[in-house]
Amino acid sequence: MTGSKFITVEGIEGVGKSTHSRTLCEYLRDRGIDVLATREPGGTRLGERIRGLLLDAGEPPMHPESELLLIFGARAEHLHQVVLPALAAGRWVVCDRFTDATYAYQGGGRGISYPRIAALEQWVQNDLRPHVTVLLDADVQVALSRVRTRSAEDRFERESLDFFTRVRHAYLELATREPRRFRVVDANGPLQDVRRRIVAVCEGLIAAE
């Protein structure tokens, strides 16, 4: 995997993950880096079908453990079909959400124990971990105010303020535990301000090569 880099983008709903993942990819491509953009849950045909089940607000309530297992099922398929082949080919991979989201949402949000998540993480991923994780962080009320302007909320977007407060706290706790991997980016302000911060992170990644 020489020359490859696995970058993940994380954060609660409303912080602009999808938008800023594209910014990151565009910047790297403009610098001649071969980048694969993907997302979780999803990234494969099966993964996208599982994503539909997980996000569908019309589905009956799901047990947290069922949610967790579906996520790791989609992740296993994603890794074997998409991420690992790309890294083996020397490409950079930028993934919108990965296992830190599982610790934050299913761990912090749903209350599943971290050791249970860690056991699945090791089983599915072996020793694969992101080289760099960009955590877009914003005040929960600011982020949710952006979400509430959308036409239809998915199953996660309908969660409570308390739920997202727990998720955000879990993300920041993860970043504190692994400061060398995480790049925490203030996502509270205008889009262009956040974009400049993302570009600064990109410049740092390239400079480290």
Image: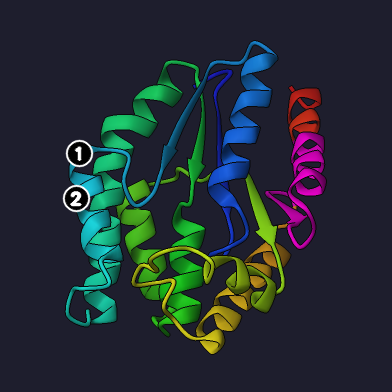
Residue 154 falls left or right of residue 185: left
Q: Is residue 97 within the magenta segment?
A: no
The magenta stretch is 180-201
Q: 61 above or below 70?
A: below
Q: In terms of secondary structure, where does tag 2 sit?
A: helix
Q: Nearer the viewer, residue 147 or 50?
A: 147
Q: Mark 2 points at which residue?
A: 49
Question: Picture coordinates of residue 10 (x, y %)?
Answer: 57, 55
Task: Tell me, yes or no, whether the two marked residues, 1 and 2, touch with CB atoms within 8 Å.
Answer: yes
The amino acid type, in three-letter code, at marker 1 is: Arg
Query: Foreground residue, 57 or 50?
Result: 57
Give the x, y percent position of residue 209. 73, 22
Residue at figure coordinates x 21%, y 55% from the top left: 50
Q: SS for tag 1?
A: helix
Relative to the observer, which residue lies in front, 18 or 200? 18
Q: Name the residue under label 1.
A: 45
Q: Is residue 70 left or right of residue 192?
A: left
